[in-house]
Image: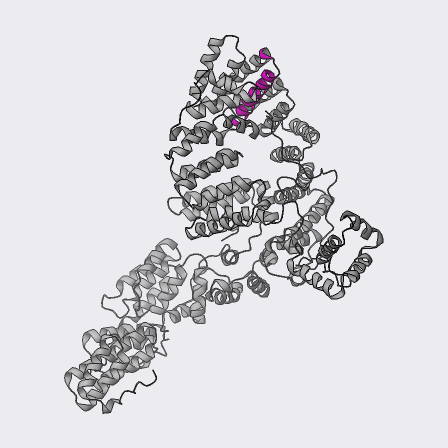
Amino acid sequence: MKGTPKPAPLHAQTTDALVTRAAFEVSREHHKEATELYKELVRRERRPAWVDALAACYAARAQNLAAKAMHKEALVLWRNRAQICAKPLIEGAYLGWLSAAGEQGELLRLLNQEQLPEAVLAELEARLAPVVLAASDKALPKLPADSALLRHRPIVLAALAAYQRADDAALAEQLQAIPYRSPYRDLKPVLKALALFHSDLDAAQAAVARLPDNGPFEPMVTLLRAAAEPGAQWLARLPGLDDNRRQVLFDLKGCPAAARPLLTELGQIVARGKDGVTASTLYDLLHKHRKGLPAGAAAALCLRLMPRAGNRLRQYQDAFGVLDEIRIEHLVALAAEACAEPEHAEDHWMRMAELLARRGGQEQRAALIWRHLAEGAPQDNRDGRLVHYLGRSVALDPKQADLHVQLVKAWRMADDKRAAEGHLKQALALFPADPGLLLEAVESALAAKAYKKAVGLARQVLALDPINPTVRALIGHALLSHARKQIKAGKPEAARKELDAAAEWLRTPAEHAGRSVLLALVSDDAGAADALLRAAYAQFGGALAGAFHLLLEAGRCGSDPRALLTRVVSLPLAAPTVEAVLALARALDGVHADQPLVRAALQQLHAPLKLAAAGGALARDDMLSLCESYQSHGDKTLLGIFATAGLKRWPQDPAFVYFKSWERHGAAPRDMGDAACRTLLDAQDRAGASGDQRTVARISALLEAAFGGADDDDDYDDEFGGAPSFEERDLVRAMVQAVGEKAFLRMGSEMLGKRAFELLRKSVGGDKQAMIEALIDLMAETGPPGMPAMPPFQPAQLISPEPPRRVQSSGAPNAPTAQKGLFDD
Amino acid sequence: MTDPYLILGLGRDAGDEQIRAAYLARIRQCPPERDRAQFERLRAAYEAIGTARARAMHALFDNTPPSVDDVLATVLSGAQVRRPDAARLRAALGPK
């Protein structure tokens, strides 16, 4: 920091200050700083405590360096420790550091010249064991004549020879013969582990895991650890090995000689980390070393890499031979999919399918491609592609029963019943016992009101699939639906027949209860009918839920709802319990009926529900669930009642603010005034602050509708230019101001031509200002006259072949409406 | 490893029976309680190529690039562990 005085040089500081500071630095493990301080102290006085402290600092620094594999640097400090502090040199990890630093010469000198304690001598000899073992007989280092390194060497060489001969028994015998205190003792577990690689890889891995670290044979242990690694992890170890050890590792992995350069280079790539291993890097590597791989292997791997490796087509063909047109289309399609360009991919898939179909004998592959295209097409068939692709697929390979079912459904979605029925008939001829197709046939029969036929088909489905719940529900509901129609048409006898037939198909208590209500409506016996109604009311859950179902059934059959209800319960209904209100909401959410009928039934229950809303017994979450339920069923009255009650109990609660706003303005959000918008914005802020992202999103959607966000029917797409922005209109307005209104109108006339200009003038009722505004809008979209048009969008070209013309679907219907249900009551 | 043929240790000309046999042999060696992840890989590999139609679909639509494991498995296909020659081994046992 500025102004802070520099510390005085060490020689100028007092001894006490140095001692204090040195102890402080040692406590912080700043051994380098402490070393300098103690050196100065020892220079002043060789006090034993200071000498010992200095030696400790040197030792700590040396150990830290050795831990980072900086053995040469560690040795320097250790020698300083010995020289300056008169500490023994050959102690601690010194010999190991000499070995790790490659100072075998020094190890030999120590062995030959020094009088060493037995323990140190033993370690020294163990550290020299690798040197003596690796040396040839002629180049053996000069050793004391009685050295165990020389005496035991022949046993070790015999063990290695046994290993070479794959003579495990002899190897074990020789290893056993190595004395316990031999300098070669650390070699025994290493050779045992090495031998296991040829017989039991699991045992080898376990043996390698037990090998100690930092032993005399550490380089070999490192190699064995790499050899024991599963998968491709060992490749990353290759750059850290010398060439000789690398070849040993390749031998242990069984790597053919021709492939070793490839794997050496691959090891360098893998060692750089995951980011280095890209499809293009792998491709280039395999291409470079293609001759080192088994025949065809490089070509096959490169082919699989090509869609993601960038434009390598020419290089591939130069190396591996020309690819045919079908293969090229295939590669381009896959490349486009990899780049998330579905339209581009689609073009090439279609071209490939056409080429395959022309070739002959490739129908199944072509069919699979059309099937793949169908999976990527809009599943509501809004653009006709789904039926086209499915149709092409089954035409080429009719044996895909599931695709026939999909095609029938797709035709139905397209509102082409004739095509659906026609195809269903063909498919059933091929697969008369397919449950999926039979189920479609059931739906077709029901749609045509051929109930007997439907029941017959349903029995076939159940014969194949006895627990199929779908077909039971279909038939049961269809028969009930038809019974309702008969009741409405004043044909009770016919209705009774349907209800009798329905009995065997209904499963749930609610379904049976519904049947009971209908039976009651057609019963001649009032007493029996009332009993049926009371039983149904109870089966529906009684209270509000029971009442709702009775009201709904009455509405569906054209009967008087209130009259039906009064046969079971007394009106007016009392204030309901919380459970009853929630049970009604569950019933509402589970019902499948026309919304007007549901709302009509609900309307009869407004009075008791109003009491429940005002009662204050419902929890906040329940109130919100009820608001959601009434909103989804379009009952604005109930929504308003509950939203208001919610706001009364939880003022300013953003969720209730939203529901209240929706109740008022949901039908016409653009009519929402500023005050209402501000209220919503404030509520949105509060919702965001409390983490209620759901309410934030809901308010956002409502405000977007209020401010006139893009409709679903508009064809604007941001990618292709978007709706005219305010900036574009401002520019054109600025131009009007600059040139004047008269000149602008003349410009507009020249741009549109006389006839179109007249038509536009008539459409705005001849109003000059309206005409100017209309021209501003037009020019903001297309650009004023004289400005160049935007270039058309060009998709990226991945590989040189041009995308084919998109195959036009023939006979595909126009965008369909939503699939009609079978039960239109 | 991403290639189902390599995962099951099969050539690309393997048929239904061969694939099924390889799959069953491998899941016997590697049941889910021993190595769940590997079991799932084996099952996914079998589902990807277990029938002729699945194999055709795999050949057409599989867009997974070969991994380093796939390259290594291809290189080492049929490889046998070798004993390093004597001089090389002694040098490897020597100092760094």
Residue A64 occupies quadrant: bottom left
Observer able to see residue A91: no
Q: Residue sitting at 71 percent across and 61 percent down?
A: A732
Observer able to see residue A53: yes
Residue A258 in magenta stretch: no
Residue A488 in magenta stretch: yes
Q: Which residue in the rendered view is the most extreme toward the top? A: A525
Magenta span main SS: helix
Q: Position of residue B22 (x, y in %)?
A: 49, 44
Q: Position of residue A556 (x, y in %)?
A: 56, 22
Image colouring:
one colour
Q: Residue sitting at 22 percent across and 81 percent down?
A: A22
Q: Position of residue A534 (x, y in %)?
A: 44, 16
Query: Which quarter of the image is occupied by the C terminus of chain A?
Result: top right
- Left or right of A196? Residue A735 is right
Q: Residue sitting at 33 percent across and 56 percent down?
A: A206
Q: Which residues are magenta?
A: A469-492
Q: How many marks?
A: 0
Reply above or below: A66 against A587.
below
Q: Nearer the viewer, residue A64 or A806?
A: A806
- Left or right of A90? Residue A219 is right
Q: Position of residue A396 (x, y in %)?
A: 69, 38
Reply above or below: A160 against B11.
below
Reply above or below: A670 against A209.
above
Q: Nearer the viewer, residue A165 or A532?
A: A532
Q: Which residue in the rendered view is the most extreme toward the right? A: A754
Q: Residue sitting at 55 percent across and 44 percent down?
A: B49
Q: Nearer the viewer, residue A230 or A466?
A: A466
Query: Which quarter of the image is occupied by the N terminus of chain A?
Result: bottom left
Q: Nearer the viewer, residue B54 or A546?
A: A546
